[in-house]
Amino acid sequence: MKKLITTAAVMAIGAAIGLSSMAVQAKETTIDPAADREAFRNFFKKHLGDKIKLDDLKDGVYALDEDARSQWEEIEEFPPYEIELDKGEELWNKKFKNGKSFADCFGKDVSKIRAKYPYHDEKTDTIVTLEGDINKCLKDNGEKPFKWKKGKIADLSAYISYEGRGQKITTEPKTDKAKAWYDKGKKFFYAKRGQLNMACADCHVYNSNRRIRGDLLSPALGHVTHFPVFRSKWGNLGTLHRRYGGCNKQVRAKPFKAQSDEYKALEYFQYVMSNGMEFNGPGARK
């Protein structure tokens, strides 16, 4: 893995297509998410070629490999997360001890919820995630919060995501505080870490659509559209922050805790980069 992606190769690829400036944080004087997103999309246009429609990247690697897509479409006819969706719907409809339910926190129209997240809360100056508000709703109603990475929180998030399919990502930082969070997530995305000295961008930008062993590396554009994800490797659903932790471990870096400021900032950055793309979660992946 380390031989596959060297620092020199990464910087050469990035410079060749005009994206390297996004990784050089120290030289930036302004935070311009819209300009970053345009550069991000232009990178993938050149990197993946005209045959790939960028909005199709909501399907991850299945937008790149026809054979893999055919198999994936067959799997989606009887999705492995179907039982979890039913569990998520049960959780949504279940009454708390005080007689209220999640609908009292989120509103009755489930289809409109997913597209509201993540967002920056100006008053508390933090990034609010869907999973974060699920547990806040439980706490506010005297209930025990769910564990962050899998289980009930992933089931409920999957149900909300499924009902919100077709809605578009609208996450966009507009205030200085929100842009500061975006910038923090951007720096995390491009920063080297771990014994392998790799960044998120090394795999999912510069070397996306290239094989590592028998697998294609997925493009970062559209990454967040299909979470939570049912991974064959896990045998169950997992949240986005569970996946972040796994990625950190793969480059031999100590993972941060789910819903840490680091992962919330990274999530926010990735959603901003995928602004305008459709939600199609939950997803099924290897």
Image (tube, rainbow, N blue to C red):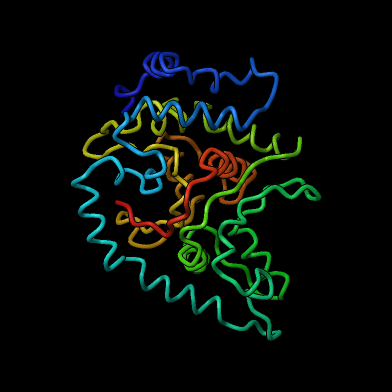
* Residue farthest toward the right in the current orientation of the protein: 123
Percent coordinates x, y for residue 95 in the rendering: 61, 83
The quadrant the N terminus occupies is top left
Q: Residue at x 47, y 17 (%)?
A: 18
**Residue 58 visible here:** yes
**Residue 195 visible here:** no
* Residue farthest toward the left in the current orientation of the protein: 67
Q: Residue at x 45, y 57 (%)?
A: 228
Percent coordinates x, y for residue 238 in the rendering: 44, 57
Percent coordinates x, y for residue 11 in the rendering: 43, 16
Residue sitting nearer the eye, 68 or 260: 68
Residue sitting nearer the eye, 64 or 25: 64
Q: Residue at x 51, y 68 (%)?
A: 156
Quadrant assignment, res 17: top left
Q: Residue at x 70, y 47 (%)?
A: 120
Residue 26, placed above or below residue 153: above
